[in-house]
Structure formats: structure tokens, C-alpha cells
Image (cartoon, grey):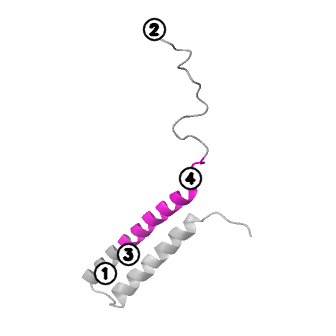
Amino acid sequence: MTRHLFRWRGLAFGLAFLALAGNWAVWEQDLLTQQQFSFTVSGVLIVLGTVGVIATFWRSGAQSSPPHPMTDTHTDPTEENHEATDSQP
């Protein structure tokens, strides 16, 4: 199965449609008062932000690999030892 790229436009239009439908449902059908609506929107934004932060840390943790146990992490193997050539009296 081939993995496809994520389509941001589809997500944006879907969220816009849900926002318009939700707005209509709240105001025309009297589902929530204005105060209940503001608390609901605030709660949804907090939950979405938390999910975004968790997803960011989850992805960054999955992409980083542990260092190889046989390599020295304090020195760069491409650097030469310049102490022998730069002897000072």
C-alpha cells in the first residue's frame, strides 16, 4: 500500500464546514448558552493544543536514535589531533 501525502486543504475545508455547522447548531437550535459555548470552545482549543504538543514530542522521540555504544560522543572522529603539531614552548 502506497502512503500518500497529507492534504492540508481538505483538513482546512473540513474544519471550516464543522465550524459553520456547529455555529448554526448552537445559535439556531439553542443547544448552548453563550457562556457554555465559550467554555466549550476554550476546552476544545486546550485539548487540541495538548494533543499537538504530545504529538510533537512523540514524533521527535521516535526520530532520534540512541548513540552507538562503541563511538565516543565527546570527540568528533573527523577532527585531527592538532595538539602534536601546535606545540608551544
Please give the residue where the numbered disc 2 appears in the rendered image. 89
In space, the residues marked 2 and 1 are separated at their CA atoms by 78 Å
The residue under label 2 is which amino acid type? Pro
Direction from residue 39 to residue 50 in the image, left or right = right
Quadrant (top left/top right/bottom left/bottom right) for the C terminus = top left
The boundaries of the magenta stretch are: 46-69
- Disc assigned to residue 44: 3
Please give the name of the residue rendered at 34% of the width and 85% of the height, measured from the top-left corner. Answer: 27
- Determine whether 79 is above or below 20 in the image: above
| Residue 49 belongs to magenta span | yes
Q: Residue at x 67, y 65 (%)?
A: 4
Alpha-carbon neighbours of circle 4 within 10 Å: few (<14), some, or many (≥20)? few
Assess disc 1: are there few (<14), some (14-19) or many (≥20) residues with their C-alpha within 10 Å of its C-alpha: some
Mark 3 and mark 2: Cα distance apart in space: 69 Å
Question: What amino acid type is highlighted by mark number 1?
Answer: Phe
* Mark whose residue sits in front, 1 or 4: 4
Q: Earlier in the sequence, mark 2 or mark 1?
A: 1
Q: Which residue is mark 4?
A: 66
Q: Nearer the viewer, residue 13 or 81?
A: 81
SS at badge 3: helix
